[in-house]
Image (tube, rainbow, N blue to C red):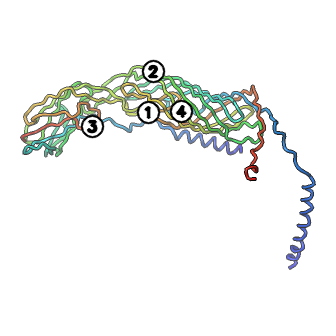
Amino acid sequence: MLSFAALAQNKPATPVAKPADTTHVITKGKITPEPKDSSWLIPGGLRVGVDLSRFINNAYYPYRQEYTVVADARITPSLFAAVELGYTNTPHSDSNYTYKGNGMFATLGIDYNFLKRQYPSERNMFFGGLRYGFSHFNFEVPSYTQHSSYWGGQVAGSYPKTNANAHWIELVLGLKTEVLKNLFLGWNVRERILLNTVKTNDGFTPLTIPGFGSGSKRAVFDMQYTISYVIPFYKIREHYHPPAPKKQPKK
Amino acid sequence: MKNIYKLLIAGAFLLGMAACENETKVCDQTLRADLHIGFRHDSAGIVRDTIFRAVTTLALNRDTLLKNNSTNNIYFPLSPVADSSQFMLKIDSLLQGDTLTFRYKRTPVFISAGCGFGTTYTIDTVLFTTHLIDSVKFINKSVTNSNDTHLYIFYFNE
């Protein structure tokens, strides 16, 4: 009973305090809005790195020797121009055939950073990207053998060196995070869609298309794990944009 | 925030490894380009498919392919090591067999990274004895798979 009495006594006390606070706030006055033409500099720069996943890939799949250099440069606060360059070598040999292939590839495109920066100079990224990929390569089968169990004996042959080009579109989604000053680690997943058909006149498809992946598929899923370094040799001016007025249409 | 990045980075690493497959190790499509032959028989003026009770086939000097099987169609695996193949065809154990000789052109084909290479054939001519066979008719001279029927053999008197 005593405690109830205590509560009853406390309750009326709070409303008394509140008016005192509100009057305090009101007397403080209005906050002056930020000037609309303010701007500041945010770090730009060229980010250069390598794709580490290719080395791990190679350990699992010895016929895929790939080397990829990635680079991107900030164009606007959230838009980046992205480039990838690479060389691949495709040696393979088993009881059926030997295969030799090598080639260069390049992809060109943009990355868009979706991550809302918590401070203007934040450089962590969660991005989506679009790329166009092109590859020029050659492949050959120096020798193949075909075994005939019923007739006995085997057939041997070879395919001459063939030059080929491939074009594809790449959709990218990934992260890049600044782990040390100017040093970034990142990963991304990507879907590549082949635009042309790579085949010899005899219907022979390459084992791999440099930069694309499997030579027998129209679309492939892949991932990258990159370590890269930013050379921050320029800055980008970011302007303050006042939030769009929402009250006006309601009026 | 930093910890989330670390987890995502580690997760992506494992995901990437699971996504690939070694195409040179898996042979999931085989090339069967055997010559497919159907039997046709004239009974009372109507030509139709016919089943023979005890069909025996073999390539000359090779193992038996079919032995006394009841069937209305047969497969001859053409030799990828020569430009002609000879087969023996007996439609009944009590009857005399016929010999068929196929002459053809061979074309090597790439099957897949895991399976390697195979051979397809384009038939040029067929020569046959006429102990029981009346005639033959080509439906398809290019033997690129075994699903098509390539040749009909006509029998008129068993």
Residue linked to disc 4 = A169
Q: CA distance from mark 4 to mark 1?
A: 16 Å
Are the residues at dot 3 and dot 4 in contact (C-beta closer than 8 Å)?
no
Q: CA distance from mark 1 to mark 2?
A: 16 Å
Element type where label 2 sits in the image:
strand
How crowded pointer 4 is (Cα within 10 Å; few <14, some 14-19, many 20+) is rated as: many
Residue linked to disc 1 = A216
Element type where label 4 sits in the image:
strand
Mark 2 or mark 4, earlier in chain: 2
Q: Which chain is indicated by disc 4?
A: A
How crowded pointer 1 is (Cα within 10 Å; few <14, some 14-19, many 20+) is rated as: some
Residue A91, relative to residue A130: is it above or below? Answer: above
Residue linked to disc 3 = B146
Mark 1 or mark 2, earlier in chain: 2
Closer to the camera in the image, A87 or B96: A87
The quadrant in which residue A180 appears is top right
Q: Which chain is indicated by disc 1?
A: A
Left or right, residue B108 beside residue A21: left
Count of marks, rendered view: 4
Left or right, residue B34 beside residue B112: left
Mark 4 or mark 1, earlier in chain: 4
How crowded pointer 3 is (Cα within 10 Å; few <14, some 14-19, many 20+) is rated as: some
For the residues beneath circles 2 and 4, the answer to whether they share a chain is: yes
Closer to the camera in the image, A177 or A172: A172
The quadrant in which residue A144 appears is top left
Q: CA distance from mark 1 to mark 3?
A: 23 Å
Residue at 36% across, 22% down = A158
Residue at 67% across, 42% down = B6
